[in-house]
Image (tube, grey):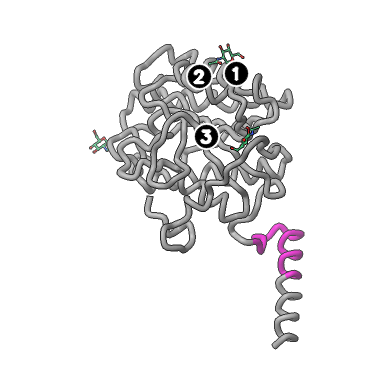
Amino acid sequence: MLLVAAILGEVSLFAALWASSSGAIPVVPERRSIANAAPLRILPLGDSITAGYLEPSGNSYRRDLECFLYSGGNGVEYMGSLNSGDWADNLNDGFDGQRIDQISVEGEPEINGTTKANIFLVHAGTNDMIQDANVQNAPRRLGQLIDKIHGVNPTALILVAQIIVNNDTDINDRIQDFNEEVPNIVTTRSDRGVPVRVVSMAAVTVDDLIEGTHPNAGGYLKMANAWYPAIVQAGTDGLISPAFGNFTNGGESSMPTGGGACSELKD
Ligand SMILES: *[C@@H]1O[C@H](CO)[C@@H](O)[C@H](O)[C@H]1NC(C)=O
Ligand SMILES: *[C@@H]1O[C@H](CO)[C@@H](O)[C@H](O)[C@H]1NC(C)=O
Ligand SMILES: *[C@@H]1O[C@H](CO)[C@@H](O)[C@H](O)[C@H]1NC(C)=O
């Protein structure tokens, strides 16, 4: 038995090496620790989509994402001024109905605070598009928000979403125009060395929405599945510095109640 185990071990090691050098699908666990298992203190920053409005659990993408990160081997602590969700670590800055400029002001206590996030997840702009509020300048406002965050959190990773689709055609046209500008806003900064990256939420479709604006549980899972590889990639690219200061790992609370993998989470 020992010999068999040893041979199997050799074979899987070989398979992993072969796969990674040949460009084939790598033989790696689905979840792995990121940035040498750095503690991740995350500020989910945005509007009601970040809060999980209309979803019965109010979890948004946040519980799924924490489960992915924690089960891969990272400590996770969400921060924010609001609570929403059916697990313990449910703090967030998902400000209901707020535009980018308002999110930027309401989020200041967390953006400026002495307890620093090392990852910001920004999904902002939906209310600018719904209200048709000076939408031509919305990308510029997003840039100002990124600059504000980076100014006081110079080592923090900032992930910026191309925001989710809307079922209203006029609103969605504005969203798509906005989303087209987001990569420019991000790359003008990342080219200067700012640890900021864009994350597409295009996997979410109108079929994943509850009432045309907010995702259902399946839509939120797609959002988690969009943030997660962006965080993995940022770790690989050396863009994640460990969270500092007192750290309370809330990751365990995100796991399915009664055990099991993250895929057991219902919402
Ligand atoms: C946050 O910092 C910015 C600039 O650094 C400042 O303009 C703003 O007043 C601060 N807000 C709070 C609530 O501390
Ligand atoms: C999207 O809009 C169409 C046309 O108004 C409507 O029939 C459909 O129910 C809407 N779907 C959602 C998820 O709101
Ligand atoms: C960390 O937490 C401990 C216990 O709550 C507290 O005494 C200490 O002041 C905290 N340190 C910082 C830097 O916040």
Would you call the spot at circle 2 few (<14 residues within 10 Å), some (14-19), or many (20 or more)? many
Q: Look at mark 1 in the image and give the residue it sits on.
A: 148
**Residue of label 3:** 79
Res 184 seen here: no
User: Do the residues under discs 2 and 1 have CB atoms within 8 angstroms?
Assistant: yes
Residue drawn at (49%, 16%) of the image: 105
- The N terminus lies in quadrant: bottom right
Q: Quadrant of residue 17?
A: bottom right
Q: Amino acid at mark 3?
A: Met
- Looking at the rendered structure, the kind of residue marked 2 is Ser
Three-letter amino acid code at the position of disc 1: Lys
CA distance separating discs 3 and 2:
16 Å
Give the residue number, with chain letter if any, for mark 2: 104
Q: Earlier in the sequence, mark 3 or mark 1?
A: 3
Point 62% across, 19% down: residue = 147
Indicate the secondary structure of the residue bearing disc 1. Answer: helix
Residue 261 is inside the magenta segment: no
Q: Is residue 20 left or right of residue 220?
A: right
Disc 3, SS: loop
237 relative to 112 in the view: left or right = right
Dot label at residue 115:
none
Q: Is mark 1 within 8 Å of ligand 1?
A: yes
Q: Is residue 227 visible from the viewing direction of this image?
A: yes
Label 2 and label 1: CA atoms lie apart by 8 Å
Q: Are marks 3 and 2 in contact (CB under 8 Å)?
A: no
Q: Which residues are magenta?
A: 13-28
